[in-house]
Image: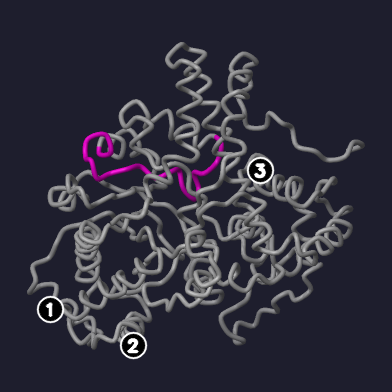
Amino acid sequence: MTEPWALHPDRALPADPGVRRIARQVYAQTAGLPIVSMHGHVEARVLDEDQPFGDPAELFVIPDHYLVRMLVSQGMGNHELGVPTRDDDSGLDVEQDHREIWRRFASNWHLFRGTPTRYWLEHELVEVFGVTTRPSAKSADALYDHLLDALARPEFRPRALFDRFRIETLATTDAATDDLAHHASLAAQGWGEKVVPTFRPDALVHVDRPGWRAAVAELTRVSGIDVQGYDAFLAALEQRRAVFRAAGARATDHGHLSADTTPLSLDDARMIFAAALRGEATTAEADAFSGHMLYEMARMSSEDGLVMQLHPGVLRDHDPHIARVFGPDTGFDIPVQVEYTRALRPLLESFGRHPGLRLVLFTIDETVYSRELAPLAGVYPAVRLGAPWWFLDSPDGMRRFRDAATETAGFYNTTGFVDDTRAFASIPARHDLARRVDAGYLARLVAEHRLDLDEALETAVDLAYELPRASYAARP
């Protein structure tokens, strides 16, 4: 490149000139709106401590499983990218030279062509950090020095970026047993409405997972309820939900392999829980218990008003060797087919029309958008469709979602965009991409005379800002 690297103002907008002109008008309505980030994985500690992010490898490469998995797919080892091992017995020499990690990433910039990771990284580097040269083997060291200098300045600390990104609300994702100390500290500093926790009980409801009994012991400690049986287990979970709600939580979050919500009898639930405490629960019993607990979580949400988010359909840790060496959720998570219609029927029969429940459904199996999820959201008052998530929060993935879901569910049975990110600096990039894609979709409806322009402008604002605020609003 002979010209300084810059991003095109029409990126991700439609290619057709007439539709693009309309899309520019629609996007202009949303580009400057505040960000409502109600489903993410940035830790509250980052904003509470407000320490500099460190170096470029620590910010962009090591924690980003999107980025790491692409390099791993080309034969690079996780350890070569600085991903730490679980212990010192792996025999792997984890790269400690962060400049070298950055060089390996920059030298392989071409691998990200056509991916949403490329779009997010471009936005971060150019719009946030003022980079004017593409990453490459030649530019790697100069870029590293540029970023290192920026990260040392106070305007690039987490809270300064939070304000610069115009984030109105950021929801973290927290274990049910988390003491929420960082949230309490933030609240004491006036940030309680800006950074809110989300209750995630996965470690407690999957009774066959390693560490489950330790998680139950921790639940006993933090709740003050002696969890020796199933009834005490429910009481302790309800107590923790109340603690989260008092700390500002708006929602719960549930990551299950299946969407099964078949309730167990009280006797069967007690029996499986007791067997699990003894380490004797079978896989079938554990699966039945996790489905039963989704039903129970819906019941609790109908009572306490926490929005229930469900995102099934990911086979975690597909490569057991990687999980053993590097720990869970280190990039080898693969989508599977999910059935929703029959699986959710028990829950929806009991709570689908309950005024106290809001159930937000996510999927990575996009074949179910028009066949199952849109029809469910299009009739049950409790159900809303979550945004395209994980492998689908890409330009074409988001367009396919609008095409498949809108005709049955409409726009107003969706909840707006969620970024689902651990990479703090990528939050504005992800929301910007969603706003551009929606602008293009709405512009096409205007060009086809299926919407008037004023309706498209109003809908764009609703999708970007009003719907996430309303969908996750605190309830009495």
**If you read the primary sequence from the N terminus, does the residue marked by circle 1 or circle 2 appear first?**
2
- Point out the frontmost of discs 3 and 2: 2
**If you read the primary sequence from the N terminus, does the residue marked by circle 3 or circle 2 appear first?**
3
**What element does badge 3 sit on?**
helix
Q: What residue type is labelled 1?
A: Met
At x 76%, y 64%, the residue is: 154
| Residue segment shown in magenta | 376-395
Q: Mark 3 points at which residue?
A: 119
Q: In this view, does 226 lie above or below 108?
A: below
- Point out the frontmost of discs 1 and 2: 2
Q: Which image quadrant: the C terminus?
A: bottom left
At x 22%, y 52%, the residue is: 356
Q: What residue type is labelled 3?
A: Tyr
Q: Is residue 122 above or below residue 75?
A: above
* Marks 1,2: beta carbons within 8 A: no
Provide residue 306's location: percent of width, then percent of height.
31, 58
Other residues around mark 2 within 10 Å, as few (<14) / some (14–19) / many (≥20): some
Q: Which mark is residue 221?
A: 2
Q: Please tell me which residue lies in front, 326 or 23.
A: 23
Q: What residue type is labelled 2?
A: Arg
The span from disc 1 to disc 3 (Cα, nearest Å) is 50 Å
- Residue most toward the right? 2
Quick check: is 378 in the magenta stretch? Answer: yes
**What element does badge 2 sit on?**
helix
Apparent side of residue 397 relative to residue 19 in the rendered image (left or right): left
**If you read the primary sequence from the N terminus, does the residue marked by circle 1 or circle 3 appear first?**
3
Q: Name the residue under label 1.
A: 271
